[in-house]
Image (cartoon, rainbow, N blue to C red):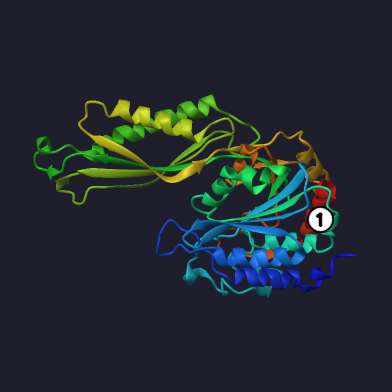
């Protein structure tokens, strides 16, 4: 029989409601950004009550990671997720973002799908397991800032051995995938290119050095580079089988009768597995240096997001095959990024698999369908039993 402590744990709906009630928005804008520390303390209390050993890794600014461990060994299972959410537009929400609203067989709330409900599912799955009989470690990771810098996953990867993470061999990141196992996803980098020329009166071009015209050269060079990358790299497993480069924002100058003295372009690159963000950043720097040589224009690149490499776990690994068997779904690929590359980098075979649809993530009136919860609990419990019991 389960330990009596488990009887103190709320039901899954109450767990989701508690998690949603604690705001934990992460944002690149300081006036919107919040800490996740209160969510971490709630989860730590819950997991300690169930018999886990909990360690809180502080990151500063009221942000932290939770590492909850039960059992010991060297072939265990990691269940990982992030506790932060994206910002929300109050004018577009018809329900309380921080209260669980149940209607139409859905639980509405900010983070209900992406991805606080996953922690409630883990707790529900563990409820029926005697932790003192685990033969291998079960490690729960709850991280900060996945939606912005991924500082939480980076900190865990940096100190993985000290934290005991490397005692496990397999990892499941519970992002919303409709419980389809994902063994591969693209990476992501976002960069600002800032050009500085010389302003002057537009009546005489010789009085200045037009940064906007220089940016025209930069964009032409970037488009040439994009074409080269897409001819060099191709993976038919992805819906968009090539790396993408999107020019998302540009701003320059201040008035039509002044020579543009400065201009900034912001772009997004989604590399395929086998492409490294650091290599792309270095190649971009070299190309900018070449195209702007002898123009008198200076440039600087600023990472808007440090970037995350693509993720690839061999489709023939035990974890992928087991997840396919349990879910009845063939392992897929997705274009969005997750924390999984950091867990692969420390030697864990990792997949992305969680309840809910990515189509609901980052949307007004975000929700998760109630019918997906019980099947997700069953699969997570079976994974724990297989790898830890």
Residue found at the far front of this picture: 162
* Residue 234: x %, y % from top left: 58, 29
The image quadrant that residue 16 belongs to is: bottom right
Of the pair 275 and 7, the residue shown nearer to us: 7
- The answer to whether residue 366 is left or right of residue 224 is right
* Residue 262: x %, y % from top left: 24, 44
Can residue 335 be spotted in the picture?
no
* Residue 304: x %, y % from top left: 41, 47
Q: Residues within 10 Å of mark 1 (few under 14, many from 20)?
A: many
Element under disc 1: helix
Which residue matches tag 1?
A: 381
Quarter of the image with the N terminus is bottom right
- The answer to whether residue 10 is left or right of residue 156 is right
Residue found at the far right of this picture: 1
The image quadrant that residue 129 belongs to is: bottom right
Picture residue at 59% right of the left edge, 48% below the top:
156
Can residue 239 be spotted in the picture?
yes
Picture residue at 54% right of the left edge, 63% below the top:
36
Picture residue at 62% right of the left edge, 39% below the top:
239
Please state the total of marks drawn on the protein image: 1
Against 111, residue 229 (above or below) is above
- The answer to whether residue 265 is left or right of residue 210 is right
Against 334, residue 284 (above or below) is above
* Residue 211: x %, y % from top left: 23, 39
């Amino acid at each position: 029989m389960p330990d009596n402590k488990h009887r103190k744990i709320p039901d899954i709906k109450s767990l989701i409601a508690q998690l949603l009630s604690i705001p934990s928005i992460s944002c690149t804008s300081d006036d919107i950004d919040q800490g996740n520390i209160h969510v971490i303390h709630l989860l730590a209390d819950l997991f300690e009550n169930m018999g886990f050993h909990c360690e809180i890794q502080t990151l500063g600014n009221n942000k932290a990671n939770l590492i909850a461990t039960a059992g010991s060994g060297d072939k265990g299972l990691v269940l990982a997720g992030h506790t932060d959410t994206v910002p929300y537009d109050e004018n577009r929400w018809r329900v309380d973002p921080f209260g669980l609203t149940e209607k139409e067989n859905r639980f509405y709330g900010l983070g209900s799908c992406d991805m606080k409900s996953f922690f409630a599912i883990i707790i529900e799955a563990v409820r029926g397991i005697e932790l003192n009989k685990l033969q291998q470690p079960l490690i729960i990771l709850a991280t900060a800032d996945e939606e912005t810098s991924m500082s939480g996953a980076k900190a865990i990867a940096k100190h993985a051995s000290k934290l005991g993470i490397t005692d496990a061999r397999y990892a499941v990141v519970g992002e919303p995938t409709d419980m389809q196992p994902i063994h591969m996803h693209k990476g992501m980098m976002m960069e600002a290119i800032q050009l500085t020329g010389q302003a002057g009166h537009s009546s005489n071009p010789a009085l200045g050095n037009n940064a906007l015209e220089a940016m025209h050269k930069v964009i032409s060079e970037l488009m040439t580079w994009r074409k080269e990358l897409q001819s060099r790299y191709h993976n038919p497993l992805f819906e968009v089988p090539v790396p993408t480069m999107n020019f998302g924002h540009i701003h320059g100058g201040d008035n039509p009768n002044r020579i543009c003295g400065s201009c900034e372009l912001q772009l997004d690159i989604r590399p395929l597995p086998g492409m490294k963000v650091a290599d792309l950043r270095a190649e971009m720097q070299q190309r900018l240096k070449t195209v702007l040589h002898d123009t008198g224009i200076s440039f600087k690149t600023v990472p808007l997001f440090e970037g995350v490499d693509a993720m690839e776990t061999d489709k023939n690994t035990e974890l992928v095959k087991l997840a396919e068997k349990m879910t009845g779904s063939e392992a897929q690929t997705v274009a969005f990024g997750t924390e999984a590359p950091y867990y692969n980098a420390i030697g864990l075979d990792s997949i992305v698999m969680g309840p809910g649809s990515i189509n609901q993530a980052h949307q007004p009136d975000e929700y998760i369908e109630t019918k997906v919860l019980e099947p997700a609990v069953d699969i997570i419990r079976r994974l724990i039993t297989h790898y830890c019991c």
